[in-house]
Amino acid sequence: MNRPIRTLSVGCLILFVALMLNVTYVQFFKAGWYNARGDNRRVTEEAYSQQRGDILVGKKAIATSVPSDDKYEWQRTYPGGKKYAPITGFMSYSYGQTGIERSQDSVLSGKDNKLFTNRLVDLVTNSEPAGGNVELTINPKVQDAAYEGLTNLGDDVQAAVVAIEPSTGAILAMASTPTFNPDRLATHDFSDAQKSYNQLRKDEDEPLLNRSIQTALPPGSTFKLVTAAAAIENLGMDGDSKVYGGATLDLPGTDKVLPNHSGTDCGGEQVTLTQALDVSCNTAFGFLGMELSDEEMQDQAEAFGFGQDYLDDIGPLAVSQYPDNGGDKAKQARAAIGQESVIATPLQMAMVSAGIANGGEVMKPYLVDRVTSSSLDVIDQGKPTTIDKQPAVSQDTAETLTDMMVSVVENGTGSPAAIDGVSVAGKTGTAQTTPERPPYAWFTSFAPAENPSIAVAVMVQKSGTERSDIAGGLLGGPIAKAMMEAAIS
């Protein structure tokens, strides 16, 4: 072989090897990156050309695909509508996916490795490929009560509720308002989808936000459960222990005082811890916040889930926080009553109640119960796990807190959540914000107190309620009551 031919042959070989290496790199190493690109229309059009799996609550599909008479073959629809929109999210040609549609996309699209055998069978039998189904932990009766409770608050409301099964962490209800119609974003009329999306994005009330997990606000007096837990665990207290209950509490290092909401004392200069929780005594819990170290309070909050990202099935999750107060006693007092820089999601406050209800063990919340193939074979099953190896509080502490929370409903601020013939444990909260905006109303509870099957948290961020009438028990108590009744009926 002469030199020019040899040089040309080597050059062609190098080009061929380079081409094969590039193809291998693109097809194997970069395939996931290209598939995940939002502007990769081939992937999107492929998703619309095959039947996507259902999202189910019980046996009812709240998201499904139906044949389409246009080139995309399948239209995603949402029978669950606005009630379930914060959970399902949406699947849009132009705007991608959110909610369960996003987190469970590999299953719903049929691309998950768990469905490999099904894809192989479809290939061999020349059947149309179909995605797997996702069955949720939601209890439809509890979800109905949650959504109805929120809508009954009126128009121009920002609020959310979450319910958990204490013994497993299974999410029984998750509702947020305002909400949206996912069908309008999934439509194949892309100009209408764009118009709807732009309207939703510009809406100051943020209807696309799932407030139950994506909004973290000061939890107010519901956080006193965490402070009470820390006091019992670290200071050797119980429900009969005496605490300061004066009308105001001096804040060290400042010329300010921490007052009670009523402007009066909590029943005397000294009251029991149970009485302090009954009337939601700011001075008592502010005092306890100064008695406890910042580290003890942080550890207790984290044991209930603060500072952790513990939700895998849907997201993103706003992480609840208890701040490092740097040893500032005035800040510690305000943080102990759920103010200062303390923030929590409704899910987090439901977990506090659920942890107490479950004897101190805080279970990791989950929303996906089962994954099945298109032929209904079970591919995966949700498994209850704790968020930590150690309980948040001891069994004895949990029992003491439960007794105290029952007293809140029977004798204190939580009376709107009382259920005839059922022992209910609860705690109210009203978090102050700024003089320009109304307070946040909170309520958290569980029932039946002696054998809990549901723990609830309600957060009302904004409503048409007069400022003087905003209270966690008045706004959140009836909603929680209806949800607990639905669960135990």
Image: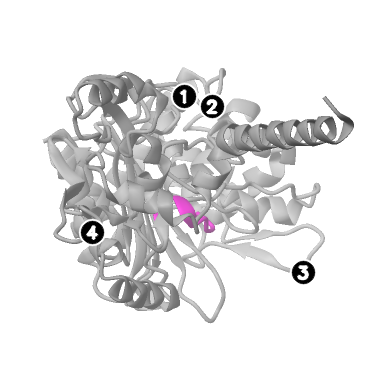
Label 1 – label 2 distance at C-alpha: 5 Å
> Quarter holding the C terminus?
top left
Magenta span contains residue 311? no
User: Which of pointers 3 and 1 lies earlier in the amino acid sequence?
Assistant: 3
> What kind of residue is marked 1?
Gly
Q: For residue 360, which numbered disc appears in the image?
A: 1
Residue under label 4: 71
Q: Which residue is at the front of the view, 19 or 315? A: 19
Mark number displayed over residue 392: 2
Of residue 459 and residue 205, the one placed in the foreground of this image is 205
Q: Which residues are magenta?
A: 210-219
- How far apart are the alpha carbons under marks 3 and 1? 39 Å
Q: Between tags 3 and 1, which lies in front?
A: 1
What is the spatial separation of the Cα atoms under label 2 and label 3, in whole angstroms? 36 Å
The relative height of residue 145 versus residue 264 in the rendered view (above or below) is: above
Residue tagged by mark 3?
Answer: 255
Mark 4 or mark 2: whose residue is earlier in sequence: 4
Name which residue lies at 53% across and 25% down. Answer: 393
